Image (spheres, rainbow, N blue to C red):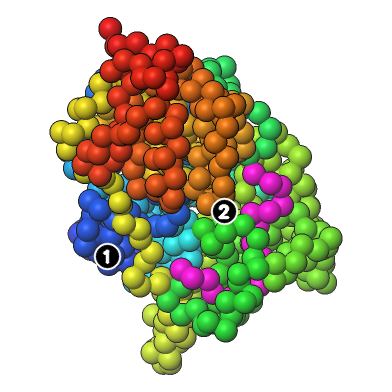
Amino acid sequence: MRQLPGGRLLEAAPRPRLLAPAGLVVYLALAALVFASSWTHPFSRLIGQGMDPPLMAWFLGWSAFAITHHLDPLLSTVANVPDGMNLMWNTAYPLPAALLAPITLTLGSAFAYNLMCTLAVALSAWTAFLVIGRYVRHWPAAAVGGLLYGFSPAMMAQSLGHPFLTLGFVAPLVLLVFDDLLIRRRYPPVLMGAALGLLGAAQLLISEEQLAAIALISLLGMLLLATANRHAVPATLTRLLPAFAVAIGVFGVLVAVPALFQFFGPQRPTGLFQQPNEYVSDLLNFVVPTPVQQIAPGWLAGVRQNFHGNVSEWGAYLGLPLLGLLVWWAIRDWSSPLVRFASVLGLTLALLSMGFTLHVAGVRTLIPVGLLALPFVALRRSFPAAYLLAAVALTSLGVIVLPMLNNLLPSRLMTLGFLFAAILLAGYVDATLSLASHRIIKLGVAGVAMLFLIPVLPFPSEEVTTPVFFTTASVQTVPASSTALVLPFPHGGDSTAMLWQAQSGMRFRMPGSYGIVAGGADRADPPWSATLRTAVALEDGMPVTVTPELLAALRADLMRWGVTTVLIGPMPHRDQATALYQTVLGRAPERIAGVELWRLDQGPTEASSDLGFRSSP
């Protein structure tokens, strides 16, 4: 709102011309090194673990298929048959998927997924490096800041299966735009407004949740500047209002179609997608490392295993050395407006990531997180304590009660929190590089602090156990665009079949899905059916009593979905599943290229004559 003093952190020295591309190359090399366990087998291993990586690869496969077949990429017609999936309610990242479509079509969805995960952290680190470079004189300081942001514990935790969150390159660029709008004022507001609208539209097509988080922290940042510069607010509004008008216009034009499709299109789910106040940062998570850190002593496992949510959401780890360094530097250089700004916003995000009530070692207390801001009242002459109290109390409450915002997971705010930690760390390194004495010792302190944040190597990855049936000409046994029932049945506990479908080039449609759909049995399940209940029981090793009623219900599902092929691939208790469907269909399956297969268009059998199966036209 006025030119901030403290030129040491605001005006960068001239940079070598090739520094920017060289920085990108270095970050890409580091990302490839971190994910080397997958890149040694990029077609048969997926970065991450659990159910999400196959789903993320499926999104890439669907987008490429939709583009080449002139289908609506926002409505999947090949999963959750017959209703489909509205992908704007899912984490489908249509913009990156469209850009990677040529790679997906030529090298496959598994390779494209690994490439996207690698590019995600590298691009995030790179844009942070470029933006932080505006505030420091020495480019190595900016490089360290980019490293902390792009490869932070939060980014590494989300790399286990959430590339829509690790594609975090937009947030630093938004900071860059606001820096020019509010501080430097080098470009016309209309131009900056257009840039803000473009960035917002791009972020919406990557992750709506992250867009909401960026909008939230942008609002909190502007309010923080306003409280510190009240006298400049009227003059600043004359610059902000036209910029926001242009931003809203550009954003609205670019996202009108996907936004209208989301809220007025088919398959609109209702209710909350996640349990409130569950996926939050535990107080101890800030100092207790998780399995995605290389240095994670086993004796702390009993503490971290009690954290709420799952390991993908345990991204608050700073470590005692880095936390102590950042606190010391904030106090030491508190006279710098940039240090004050980054410190307060970083602290705000850390508190907001903890949810509404405090969680300690997995114990959900009744203590409002906002109470943690009370001690800062004692520092109110030099610290904006009233702002911190209001921001944390009101925002954490809003994330619970306000529509749309109540689906934002608080723990994920730490992906942005590390951006402000990176700015502080870069400032410390920059000041240290300017010293004539004790430089090595002080840089060593930063190095030790970063050492505790090194990602675990080898980084978790999972082997893709795809039967060759789906990746060879054998899949042509299934009529193109017909409906196939595939076991393991796709649902919130198993996305394996969706990856097989993607690797087949979306040869067939199938019932079931791991995604948010209208009328779903649970937040990520398809609607309840006898097939879903039976499949879950089989996978869990539960006994399945074959009764006439169950057989009739399973046959009714096949009829209702228009299934012409039944396929069973590798799955838990495969023999029991095969025996069940042999009874349902009245004959033994064919065994082709690693799957059991029944063709239902070959005419009725004695056991299934009442189903009315007919030959395909």
Residue 285 within the magenta-colored segment of the rendering:
yes
Q: Is residue 45 left or right of residue 396?
A: left
Q: Is residue 316 above or below residue 71?
A: below
Q: Name, please, the residue furthest toward the front.
A: 606
The residue at 47%/34% (across/down) is: 513
Q: Residues within 10 Å of mark 2 (few under 14, many from 20)?
A: many
Question: What residue would you read off at disc 1?
Answer: 36
SS at mark 1 in the image = helix
Q: Is residue 473 left or right of residue 552?
A: left
Numbered badge on residue 465: none
- Whichever of callouts 1 and 2 sits on the residue coming sooner in the sequence is 1
The residue at 40%/27% (across/down) is: 585
| Residue 522 picture location, percent across and down | 62, 37
Residue 188 within the magenta-colored segment of the rendering:
no
| Residue 460 picture location, percent across and down | 38, 64
Q: Based on the displayed image, in which of its 4 quarters is residue 341 positioned?
A: bottom right
What amino acid is labelled 2 in the image? Arg
Q: Is residue 494 left or right of residue 14?
A: right
| Residue 365 picture location, percent across and down | 80, 63
The residue at 40%/57% (across/down) is: 48
Question: What residue would you read off at disc 2?
Answer: 412
Question: Which one is nearer the viewer's eye here, 196 or 257?
Answer: 257
Please state which of the two labelled residues, at mark 1 or mark 2, is closer to the viewer. Answer: 1
> Which residues, given as a range, are shown in magenta?
274-292
The Cα atoms of the two marked residues, 1 and 2, are separated by 25 Å
What amino acid is labelled 1 in the image? Ala
Main SS, magenta region, reads: loop
Q: Is residue 376 above or below residue 90?
A: below
Specify whether residue 526 is in view. Answer: no
The residue at 51%/20% (across/down) is: 556
| Residue 489 picture location, percent across and down | 45, 38
Q: Residues within 10 Å of mark 1 (few under 14, many from 20)?
A: some
